[in-house]
Amino acid sequence: MQCFKQLMAGAAIVTLLSFSISVKAGPGGYAGSYDADIYDFAPVTEVIPIYTDIQVRTPRTQCREEQVAYREPVSPAGTLVGGLIGAAIGNNLGGRRQGRYHHRGGATVAGAVVGALVGNQISRTSAPVYYTTESRCGVVDEFTTRRELVGYDVRYRYNDRAYLTRTDHHPGDRIRVRVVVSPAP
């Protein structure tokens, strides 16, 4: 039984091997006639470079000089003097209206507040102003256009026929072509 199995396995291997050789050989028994690549060279008749425009953004800092006005800091003296004057006026007015000086404290406080506000405003408007030049800077985008080579349109002739292809490099005066040969039906 063991011998029969070995005989059958050997026959199967021989059959597969002979089938493989006939497939590789193709019709007519010529090995390699259908699956071999054939290359040749064709003369280049024209090469046209192809470009694309790319927009490039470049951020840059832009500065300008600007004149700025500053007031001297306000002295609290104007507020204090205005508050005292306003309190005195409020005290006098509050006492005259009531006849008996009952609400003199409220009028005094109100006069002091109004006087302090007026004194502060007078101090602000009369404070000296000085001017200085300062740099103001900001980032702005600057756009430029750059041309970039992306390839070549190549025209060539092979067997009196014109062809066009695109390559990523300049081919020179000839280009390598693959020739496909197959039997006509």
Image (spheres, rainbow, N blue to C red):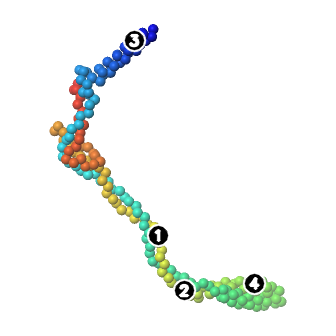
- Of the residues shown, which amino acid type is indicated by label 3? Leu
Which mark's residue is nearer the viewer, 1 or 2? 1
Upstream in the sequence, badge 1 or badge 4? 4
Q: Quadrant of residue 5?
A: top left
- The label on residue 138 is 1
Q: Mark 2 points at which residue?
A: 129
Q: Are the residues flagged by discs 4 and 2 in contact, CB closer than 8 Å?
A: no
Circle 3 Cα neighbour tier, 10 Å, few/some/many (<14 / 14–19 / ≥20): few
Q: x and y percent of residue 25 in the render?
A: 27, 23
Upstream in the sequence, badge 4 or badge 2? 4
Q: Quadrant of residue 60?
A: bottom left
- The label on residue 109 is 4
How far is mark 4 from mark 2, CA to CA? Answer: 33 Å
Q: What element carries label 3?
A: helix
Q: Name the residue under label 3.
A: 7
Upstream in the sequence, badge 4 or badge 3? 3
How far is mark 1 from mark 4, CA to CA? Answer: 50 Å
Which mark's residue is nearer the viewer, 4 or 2? 2
Which mark's residue is nearer the viewer, 4 or 3? 3
Which mark's residue is nearer the viewer, 1 or 4? 1
- Of the residues shown, which amino acid type is indicated by label 2? Val
Q: Quadrant of residue 176?
A: top left
- Of the residues shown, which amino acid type is indicated by label 4? Val
Q: Is mark 1 on a helix, strand or loop?
A: strand
Upstream in the sequence, badge 1 or badge 2? 2
Visible residue check, residue 72: yes
Q: x and y percent of residue 95 in the render?
A: 79, 89
How far is mark 4 from mark 3, CA to CA? Answer: 128 Å
